[in-house]
Amino acid sequence: MNYVPKEIPEGINVTHRHPLVNFAYLLGTVVIVSGLIFIVLGFVASYLATRISPETEEKIGQMLIHIVSEEEIEDDQRISYLDELLNSLPEPAEKIRLPLKVHLLKSEEINAAIMPGGHVLIHTALLETVKSENELALILAHELGHFQARDPLKGLGRSLVLMVVSAVLGISTSKSGGISEIVSFTSGLAELSYSRKQERAADLYGLAKIINRYEHGGYSLDFFRRLAEEEVRVLKLSKYFLTHPLSEERIKKLSIAAQERQWKMNGDFTPLPEWLLCPDMEECEKL
Amino acid sequence: MDVLLQILIFLVLLTLGYLMGSYFEKRHYKSIRQREQQTRHIPLVTFGAKQHLPETDDAQLFVGSVVISIDYFKRISAALRNLVGGRITVYESLLDRGRREAMLRMKEQGIAWGATQILNVRLETATIGGRSGNNNGLGSIEVIAYGTGVRS
């Protein structure tokens, strides 16, 4: 028997599909599905968060507050001042489901935050930056707005959902390579737009309380204005990844809202107590 | 900024993986086709294990083995495919290249020795890295082809 070589066939064991088309299809599916899962479960978590009783919330808050208790400054007259200012903001008829507690933290970062259970965290750097009581009151009212909307509880619920989902999919482990990055990036983006919505609502709530307390909104936006000047230097692209809206945008939105509601946006300056920067009174005596 | 940097690194790796990966694959396929044409006068057959071999003067074992690594782009594609299921087309070409290259290496050794045909050809595949341990950076396959070359 003679062997006659035949033409060699090509591509029998390879599917003819362009790898980029294949990749685009896969990426699209995974991004859309994980985005949908996250949005749906996020809404479920937010809904459940609104049904948590104040007692449970208090317990959650007590557990979480331990995280920051190390940097906390206690027995300071600034705390009672902040407490007083915060509690003067809601209208008498407004229902606050838990007593609010101000925590003063020693930190170089200009920040204020709210935690479940009505714990308002104020960084010392923030107190050094604010120039008037109007500004400080707007920041406190903003945090109060988050508390009233149960945003910290919702945020907690949503991050729990994300953790559970990634644990179930096994994407939190290092074995899956870049997939955890893709999924967490998608959910991160979904979360950002959600958190910006919350920030806008809290801003609006805050300004309403300021109008109520001082009968005008003058000077209260100055803090954001100073922030806006800082932000000009920040890279343009990175604004898509900020949890808070840009300060300039916040000022614009608030001004429009104030115009619509015919709020008075100028008025008297309410100074901060002189001792705010020198709680021990020693430095002030030197001045 | 951290997120941006991560995405940037990811995209750079992905592009690099795709460009280099497809360049090497194209070049490899070109070489495979050319060498297959050059060596197709020697038959490779799978019988011989329980059949009578043809009468020959001389016989020898020839082993051709090749190790090929996946690129970053293939890895991400396959990992995405793992979530939704279906054919991992990016790995099909990888294995196809491995099998053909291993057989060619075996055949070329045989031709150099003077084989007139290679009998009882077998193929085996092994994964190197990837599966064992936590090291997911390494994912490659080894394909071994072996057969009995005869000359008369």
Image: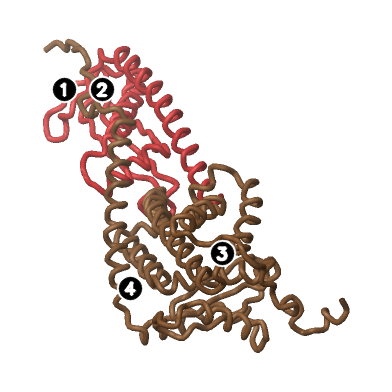
Chain colours: A brown, B red
Mark 2 touches mark 4? (CB < 8 Å): no
Residue drawn 62% across the image and 72% down it? A123
| Residue receiving disc 2 | B150
The quarter of the displayed image where residue A171 is located: bottom left
Mark 2 touches mark 1? (CB < 8 Å): yes
> In the image, which is nearer the foreground, mark 4 or mark 1?
4
C-alpha separation, residue under disc 4 versus residue under disc 1: 80 Å
Which amino acid type is marked by label 4?
Ala
Q: What secondary structure is marked by label 2?
A: strand
Mark 3 touches mark 4? (CB < 8 Å): no
Query: Above or below — where is A278 with respect to A176?
Result: below
| Residue receiving disc 4 | A49
> In the image, which is nearer the foreground, mark 2 or mark 3?
3
- Say few, some or many: other residues with alpha carbon within 10 Å of mark 4 (under 14 / 14 to 19 / 20 or more): many
Q: Is residue A273 left or right of residue B87?
A: right
Residue drawn 48% across the image and 55% down it? A259
> In the image, which is nearer the foreground, mark 2 or mark 4?
4
| Residue receiving disc 3 | A217
**Are the residues under marks 3 and 4 on the same chain?**
yes
Q: Is residue A257 left or right of residue A18?
A: right
The quarter of the displayed image where residue B97 is located: top left
Mark 2 touches mark 3? (CB < 8 Å): no
- Say few, some or many: other residues with alpha carbon within 10 Å of mark 1 (under 14 / 14 to 19 / 20 or more): few
Q: Earlier in the sequence, mark 3 or mark 4?
A: 4
Q: What secondary structure is marked by label 1?
A: loop
Q: Nearer the viewer, residue A170 or B127?
A: A170
Label 2: chain letter: B
Q: Nearer the viewer, residue A258 or B148?
A: A258
Query: Above or below — where is A189 with respect to B44?
Result: below
Residue A265 in percent (x, y) is at 56, 60
Which amino acid type is marked by label 3?
Gly
Q: What secondary structure is marked by label 3?
A: loop
